[in-house]
Image: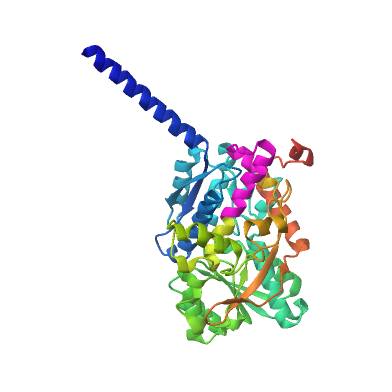
Amino acid sequence: MKLRNLVIAVAALAAGMSTLSTSAYAQAKEQYIPVLSYRTGPFAPNGAPWANGFVDYLKLVNARGGINGVKLSFEECETGYDTARSVECYERLKGKGASFVQPLSTGATFAITEKAPADKVPVVTIGYGRSESADGSVFKWNFPIAGTYWVASDAIIQAIGKKEGGLDKLKGKKIALIYHDSPFGKEPIPLLQERARMHGFDLQMLPVTSPGVEQKATWLQVRQARPDYVVLWGWGVMNSTAIKEAQATGYPREKMYGVWWAGAEPDVKDVADGAKGYNAVTMQHGAEPQSKVVKDILTMVHEKGQGTGPKDEVGQVLYMRGAMSAMLGIEGIRAAQERFGKGKVMTGEQVRWGLENLNLTQPKLDTLGFAGVMRPISTSCADHMGAAWARIHTWDGKGWKFTSDWLQADEQIIKPLVKSTAAKYATEKKLAPRTPEDCQS
């Protein structure tokens, strides 16, 4: 009897070990992606649609069969848009085989940038983070793909210049920057100061304390100074508050230009007609409800009962930002597989190589479902941004409509600014910038 029990116990143990081995093997065959998100707190109305778009795109990739057969696994960690909590999430999830991390916060990006090289985890920042990290020779692990805040602010000044009849017409004008008093809000300042020096406009800087629900003193300054234009560098509740204050003080919304984090449905829907005429720069895309990627997500994810958020937000601005952010990270993995082996799980170091060697041609984007949504992107060792295009869209009281042609940030202004700021960082951190020869290895 004892012998029979021993045999059963050994068999059970063997079965358990077999199950554990199979489970571990299954996990090892999946590409793991941590998702740092914020669905709570004052920034949740904007953070949630981004996260829904990001996660739905991961689900779409799995529904399409994965990346050359490799399925994705992911795990969300709530940050509340708090830098300390973001770092805690990063530390907790990085050891699970993180392909890359998207902090979704400039403050968190600054903190995680210091950790990524040792951890060998790429830091992907689509439309936020450190603008100087476009210099891949210094920031080997950072990827501000498709646009930085210097691109956004440069495009806004170009749009204002076109409205005035030329950049030379900005001389003597007053432009007020109302910004979130955080690393995020301070990012555009160097570029705007350079443009002000070049064109002779007066730049007034008005910080707003987070989360931005109290702006009466700020808009009293606007009423007194009477700037020709207001650039709004806000996020979350700060944006709708600013538009409401502009309406209350009689400041023309058509004279307001928001960053691409201040140009989505949650920013204007509560104001509706009161926000009519308000402009924002877009990170290539806008609201894209008719795009193929949206139709695929609705068919292959939501209609299967696997949608992450409300069906009616699929295709809205921030949802598309999340989907686009996921796509760019996934294509970094796909590019890595082209070199290191199709059908294999890529390490963070291999994904870093893939992100540095992206070549998203228009046919590739079309195949992925992003036709008409964005322009081609090509990264390199020296250029971790890959594209510097933007557009302006305007709220008409019911929806966002594009109101400009494509705008390309002026590389003659941005490149020297990137180089000098990155060089300063390298000196401070005692880093030796990579040479072209280093990039070949």
Residue at 52% in and 87% down: 250
Above/below status of 306 relative to 354: below
Q: Quadrant of the C terminus?
A: top right
Above/below status of 83 relative to 282: above
**Could you tell me what secondary structure mostly forms the magenta stretch?**
helix
| Colour style of the rendered protein structure | rainbow
**In x, y percent, where is residue 75?**
45, 47
Q: Along the horizontal axis of the image, is 277 left or right of 6?
A: right
Does residue 110 appear anywhere in the picture? yes
Residue at 46% in and 60% down: 302
Above/below status of 254 relative to 21: below
Spot the residue most to the left: 1
**In x, y percent, where is residue 167?**
75, 76
Looking at the image, which is closer to me, 437 or 373? Answer: 373
Q: Quadrant of the N terminus?
A: top left
Does residue 431 appear anywhere in the picture? no
Looking at the image, which is closer to me, 223 or 6? Answer: 6
- The range drawn in magenta is 326-353
Looking at the image, which is closer to me, 275 or 153? Answer: 275
**In x, y percent, where is residue 31?**
54, 41
**In x, y percent, where is residue 165?**
75, 82
